[in-house]
Every structure is written in C-alpha cells, then in structure tokens.
Image (spheres, helix red, strand yellow):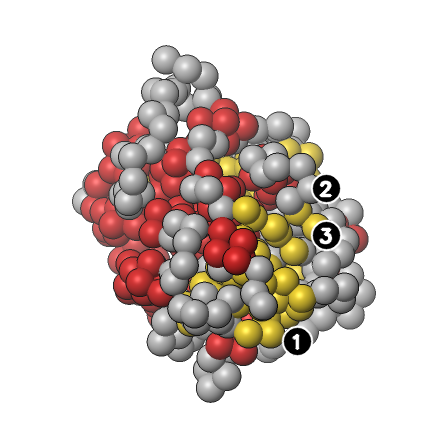
Amino acid sequence: MHDEEFTSRAIVIGGGIGGLAAAAALHRRGWRVSVLERSPSLEPVGSGISLAPNALRALDVIGLGDEIRGLSAWQGDGGMRTPGGRWLSRTNAEAAAKAFGGSLVLLHRAMLVERLASLLPAGCVRVGAPAELSDPGSADRPAVVRTQEEEIEAGLVVAADGINSGVRRVLFPGHPGPVYAGFTTWRVIVPAPERPFPPHETWGRGRLWGSQPLKDGRIYAYAAAAVPEGGHAPDDEKSELRRRFGGWHHPIPAVIAAAEPGQVLRHDVRHLAEALPAHHHGRVVLVGDAAHAMTPSLGQGGNQAIEDAIVLAHHALPGPGPGPALAAYTAERLPRTTAIARRAARTGRLTTLRSAPAVALRNTVIAAVSRLGPGLVLRTFADIANWQPPQRTYAAQAQNQDGTKR
C-alpha cells in the first residue's frame, strides 16, 4: 500500500547549487521537500562563481536575487590579455549591463550555497546521507529512493548529484557519460596583492589564467592548461602554477606567491559531450551537471543549474502524474542547455590552442573584433545572458555597480 502523501513529496538527491535552488523553488510551489546530500556538510570547494543576469533573474523568482547582488562583486571592467600583458580586448561594466539587461557578479560558492539553504525549512537538508534511485516511478506508482536507513516514496525525485550522477546511469544506462574535455583547471582564493590591477583573463598557448576580485577584497584566480588527463604535480600544485604561469604579467606571479600550497584546487575538466535524450524519466528529473555537465569556458554551469531549478518548479506542481510537466521541462531545457554546452566546448578548445600560428591568428581576430566596438563582442553572449524566467519574478530594485540601491 502506497502512502498517498507521496504525491506532494519531492526528494532532491544532491545539495549543491542546483539541488538547493530546485529545493527552494519547489518548496515555494507547495512541495514537501527533502534534500539528501552525500557529503558530511554543504560546504563547497573554496572557489568563486560568476553569476550572469540570466541566473540572477532566476534567483529573483525565489526572492534571493537582490541579496546575492548585494553580496557580490560586480564584474565587467577589465578584459583579455596576452601573457606579456598586452591587451587584446577591453570590457566595460556599463556596456555589459546594457547588452545583457543586468550586470555580471562574482561571489564565493559557499556564500551562495548558504543563502540557498537558508530558504528551506529547518531539518529539510540531510547531510551525510547518500541516496540511490530504486524505482523511477510512473503515473500510477511513486518513485522510490533508498538511503542507508530507509526507502522513501516520492511524487518527484530531482537528481542533482553532479557530473558522475548515479541517477543518470540508472535512467539512461546506454549513455556514455562524461568524457575528458582536454584540459585541467586550477582554482584558488588569496588576499589581494599590494599593487592594484584590473580584472583580466589572459590567454596563452594551451594555457589560460584569470584574476577577479571578490567583494571582501580577496582575489579569485583560475587557470587552465591543455595537459593529459589524470596528471598531478610532482611536488605541489602551487609549484605547478609557478612553473606554468610564473613568468606571466602582473598580478599572476603575486597571486601564485600568495597561495598556500594546500589551497590550490586542481580538477580535470570533464563534460557530457553527447546530450541526453531527455532530462526526465518517470517521476525523476535531472538538473545541473547531472543533466548537462559543460566545460567552464562560458561560466554557465552553475547558472544553467539555477535556470533548471526555476523552470522545473514552474512546470511541476504537487499532485498525481507529473509526466506532462516533466516533459515540458525537458522540452524547454534540453535545446538550450545542449546549445550552451556545445558553445562552451568550442570556447574551451579555442582558449587552449597550442599551435603558435593558431594562437597568433586567434589573438589577431580577437583584437580586430574588439576594435570594432564592445557591442560586437558582447552580442556573442547576449542570447545566453538575456534569458527570462517563465514566470513573474520579484522586482529587483535598481542598483549601482557597487551593489547599493538607487
């Protein structure tokens, strides 16, 4: 005998950005939500996340957009450089905000996770609770999730269990899963160097570096290099950064010097090179990296997970038979995320070109396009950043670029 209350129960597997955003959005729509997170805490890795206007509008729907804007550093000024320091292109925050209908912001991932979790009722999130999908369910039976202690029947299961999603393997066993994208990344947060610098992203031969300020005065730095999969520094990753980037322009050597060896995070970049046939099956829906893991080259992985959450909650209301709602979710999300993931993969290949002639040609084209005006460059990202949620949002108040109200 099934517990008839299952029709209003939603289980979210995974307590990252996508899972918590989905839980918050579904809670607002009347679902009784539980979040099951495998890790012993919700504390994410120590890195930053850039949120574009599309994700901020999605956060507006759950009443969090203005708070995140206020907690973040506003991006836009800066540009792209060569390892020697020459500017290939310059960006302007005001022009970017005009093109995208809002500004890009940067904050620590831990801060975003904490604010998302604060939207949920006490006891809603269980950490140290690995979970598996036992049955995806159907119109006439619940989905079933198994933990170490119990089996839970649910009207909806949200798989937000990341790039190595076990739920995805259950739903789509024939899918090849994630593959190596051809480069690895390093990330670190350090105190700002004494000598000031403009925010930048620097493209070299098979290597990339970015330095961006956080609102608290620290620097979020990230790097990438086209290297074989599975590599590790012979000593420590700080030394590896010094070997690969220590001769590049300021502030890169100073940022590396400020890092503690154990602070530097290194991860091979993997993505779903082949799109899934759907983002749902039965009463189960995939969000974030579980559905469309992409390279970080456009900074849209977390942004698309937040979009997923809002679109899912828009379509899925508590009640029997969520099939049509989840089909509508797939129809809305699959084409968009597939296109963005493919564009991110192409951008990743462009940033990590290793041939000297190809790099010279790339830099020449970037500089030439930049001279034609910032509007041309910004338009290449506008179709991503201009996305609007499928429902009325909370009105975000106008803000200055420092986050203060106007």
Quadrant including the C terminus: top left
Residue lying at 77% horizontally and 47% vertically, measured from the top left? 260
Q: CA distance from mark 1 to mark 3?
A: 29 Å
Residue lying at 57% horizontally and 60% vertically, measured from the top left? 3
Residue depth check, mark 1 versus mark 2: number of the one nearer the observer: 1
Q: Residue 258: which numbered mark, if any?
A: 2
Q: Is residue 105 above or below residue 321?
A: above
Task: Please indicate, yes or no, whether residue 159 appears anywhere in the rendered image.
Answer: no
The residue pinned by badge 1 equals: 230
Q: Is residue 388 above or below residue 137?
A: above
Q: Is residue 353 above or below residue 405?
A: below
**Which mark is first along the chain, 2 or 1?**
1
**SS state under label 1:** loop
Q: x and y percent of residue 239 in the render?
A: 74, 58
Q: Residue 127: which numbered mark, if any?
A: 3
Quadrant including the N terminus: bottom right
